[in-house]
Image: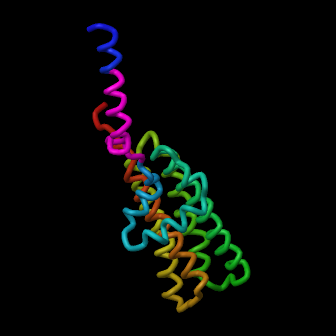
């Protein structure tokens, strides 16, 4: 090919690319973030999940599932520890309630421990981390039952237990996105 033919061909191709520039398939940037994917898994309470997680910039900016899970579990530890401390404070003011004492010293102790265990197992045993995140919700459920058995009706307790149970569910769903451990390696 001579030089003028090559320049003409290059010019023609350039015009074709320019004229079709708006119609060429472009890679679509995914706007869904990892935390949003977890909240979709929640189902009907997806908006509640979004509201919860969007209060934590480190969660919303997570770039990997492992980082997301780490931050979700750190938030879960923080929130369940606050709940435990609330029950301890209430127990100290009202030492006669066996249910409140059980919530403070047993149920929430196990919940905080389960979240901490899940955090420590994220890399080495993701399946165990997933299980621990799930069973962390047993503490607030058992606390609600114990309070109900003693006929203690307190909206603050109910909300707190419901919130921590929900956080456990969200942490469980987040850890579902971790790669499963390979058996036999």
Furthest toward the right, the residue is 93
State the quadrant of the N terminus: top left
Q: What residue appears at the point 60 percent right and 79 percent down from the top-left corner?
A: 100
Q: What residue appears at the point 60 percent right and 69 percent down from the top-left corner?
A: 105
- Count how many numbered circles sit on residues in the image: 0
Q: Is residue 144 above or below residue 179?
A: below
In which quadrant of the rendered view does residue 101 lie?
bottom right
Q: What residue appears at the point 58 percent right and 86 percent down from the top-left corner?
A: 155
Magenta segment = 10-29
Q: Tell me if residue 16 is in the magenta stretch.
A: yes
Q: Nearer the viewer, residue 3 or 29?
A: 3
Q: What residue appears at the point 42 percent right and 52 percent down from the top-left corner?
A: 175
x, y percent for residue 178: 39, 46
State the quadrant of the C terminus: top left
In which quadrant of the rendered view does residue 17 lie?
top left
Q: Nearer the viewer, residue 102 or 3?
A: 3
Furthest toward the left, the residue is 1
x, y percent for residue 36: 45, 58
Q: Tell me if residue 171 is in the magenta stretch.
A: no
């Amino acid at each position: 090919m001579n030089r003028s033919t090559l320049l003409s061909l290059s010019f023609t191709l350039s015009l074709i690319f320019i004229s079709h520039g708006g119609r060429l398939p472009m890679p679509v940037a995914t706007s869904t973030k990892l935390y949003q994917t977890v909240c979709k898994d929640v189902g009907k309470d997806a908006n509640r999940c979004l509201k919860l997680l969007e209060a934590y910039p480190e969660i919303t900016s997570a770039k990997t599932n492992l980082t997301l899970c780490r931050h979700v579990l750190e938030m879960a530890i923080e929130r369940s520890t606050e709940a435990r401390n609330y029950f301890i404070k209430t127990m100290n003011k009202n030492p006669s309630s066996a249910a409140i004492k059980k919530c403070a010293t047993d149920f929430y102790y196990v919940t905080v421990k389960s979240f901490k265990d899940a955090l420590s197992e994220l890399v080495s045993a993701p399946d165990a981390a997933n299980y621990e995140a799930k069973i962390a919700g047993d503490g607030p459920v058992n606390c609600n039952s114990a309070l109900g058995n003693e006929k203690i009706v307190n909206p603050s307790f109910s909300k707190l237990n419901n919130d921590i149970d929900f956080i456990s569910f969200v942490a469980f769903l987040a850890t579902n996105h971790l790669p499963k451990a390979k058996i036999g390696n």
